[in-house]
Amino acid sequence: MPFSTLEDFHFSAGPWNIHTGADPFGPEVRDDRDFAAKLKMLKDLGFDYVQFHDDDVVPDSASQAELEQIAGDMRKLLDSEGMTAEFVAPRIWEDPRTIDGAITSNDPAERAYGIRRGKRSVDIANILGCDRIVLWPAREGTYIREAKDAVAASQQLCDFANALLEYDPKIRLLGEMKPNEPMDLMYLPTTGHFLALVYKTVDPDRVGVLIESAHAILAGLDPADEMAYALWHGKLWGVHLNDQNGLKFDQDKAFGTANLRRAFNQVDVLVRNGYGQNGEIIGLDVKAMRTQKFDRAHMHLKNSKDVFLALADLALSIDRSEWQALRDARDYEGLDAFIMKQLMGRA
Ligand code: XUL
Ligand code: MN
């Protein structure tokens, strides 16, 4: 696979990435914007794709007929702005029926609700014209290990994937794994766990992963190596680039702002492995600081995209023969200095 070019990269973000600044300890600090305003903002910033949760498009209370109508209207709005849906993710963590999980709840009626919600996301995706469903299994875990049977839970996660794959023969499912939040003990806490589950599903060819930088970092893993492993499986179908300052809450910092070198290594592995050439999108999952004023509370998106493009430019122009010569000589101190100079613009 040849290297990606800058033209291979298309960017996406979700409406939740332009937000009001509420956090678990305090209320909103900025006004909200309606979806159409967010869409225009994204377009102006050079984004061509939008990420959706199911209820960003259609409220869960809508009937099937209403779903078709509302999702159809959203499709028209996207078309009129020249935007495309990247994926739909069932928001299976806010409903009272999913307090104990939507997939691994001990109550079969709640598990049935989770599957119904997943199928509705497939219906919405079809109307929006995208074939990707992203699964972030937020409440699939426990606060105390004795609360659920972890072997049964593994099968329930596989059953959920199978239900969606069987519901629609074209849909693809992307697992987005996160180790630390909101549950204490999360099932399938890393990409590697989900990749092992992929091969137990009824159609492994239609199951892959979306890797979020911060989620890998929170698991104590290097996001570039996580991406490399998924690329080797041919299963890196989405990314959520962002950054994370140590083992804290999921910060969703702008890409590259906590650790530029770690960001470069993510971009480099994507560039070297032709990411984007089969329709994969550069997705961002970033949030403006709570302390940012309203009028420029979208600049974290632009900043992240600019950092990505600058690092992609570096990955495409860096002297790879010098890099290789340093590897061949096992001069890793020299390689360390070489990379640092590149990142500092002092090469
Ligand atoms: C949670 C997270 C989600 C998913 C989509 O940490 O990243 O927003 O990206 O459900
Ligand atoms: Mn994410």
Image (spheres, rainbow, N blue to C red):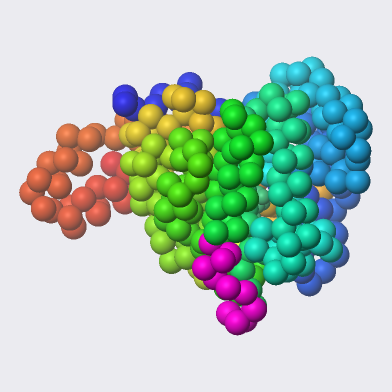
Rendered image quadrant of residue 39 = top right
Q: Residue 22: horizontal and vertical position, in percent?
A: 80, 61
- 79 or 107: which is nearer to us? 107
> Quick check: is 145 in the magenta stretch?
yes
Question: Eyeballing the image, is 171 above or below 136?
Answer: above
Identify the residue at image location x=58%, y=45%: 162
* Left or right of 288 in this view: 276: left
Residue 45 lies within the magenta run: no
At 33% from the left and 34% from the top, the residue drawn is: 272
In the rendered image, residue 201, in percent from the top left (x then y), is placed at: 50, 46
Q: Nearer the viewer, residue 47 or 302?
A: 47
What secondary structure prevails in the magenta region? Answer: helix
Magenta residues span 144-154
Q: So how many labels did they put on this image?
A: 0
Asked if residue 167 shows in the view, the reply is: yes
**Farthest left residue?**
329
Relative to 175, is 3 on the left or the right?
A: left
Tell me if residue 175 comes above or below residue 133 in the rendering.
below
Q: Is residue 108 above or below residue 323?
A: below
Residue depicted at x 91% and y 46%: 61
Asked whether the viewer can see residue 285, the reply is no
Image side of residue 215 versus residue 228, left or right? right
Q: Nearer the viewer, residue 341 or 247?
A: 247
Query: Residue 310, percent across and down?
Result: 46, 36
Q: Residue at x 46, y 40 (%)?
A: 204
Q: Quadrant of the C terminus?
A: top left
The residue closer to the viewer here, 293 or 125, is 125
Residue 174 percent coordinates (x, y): 55, 43
Q: Is residue 145 above or below residue 92?
A: below
Quadrant where the N terminus sits is: top left
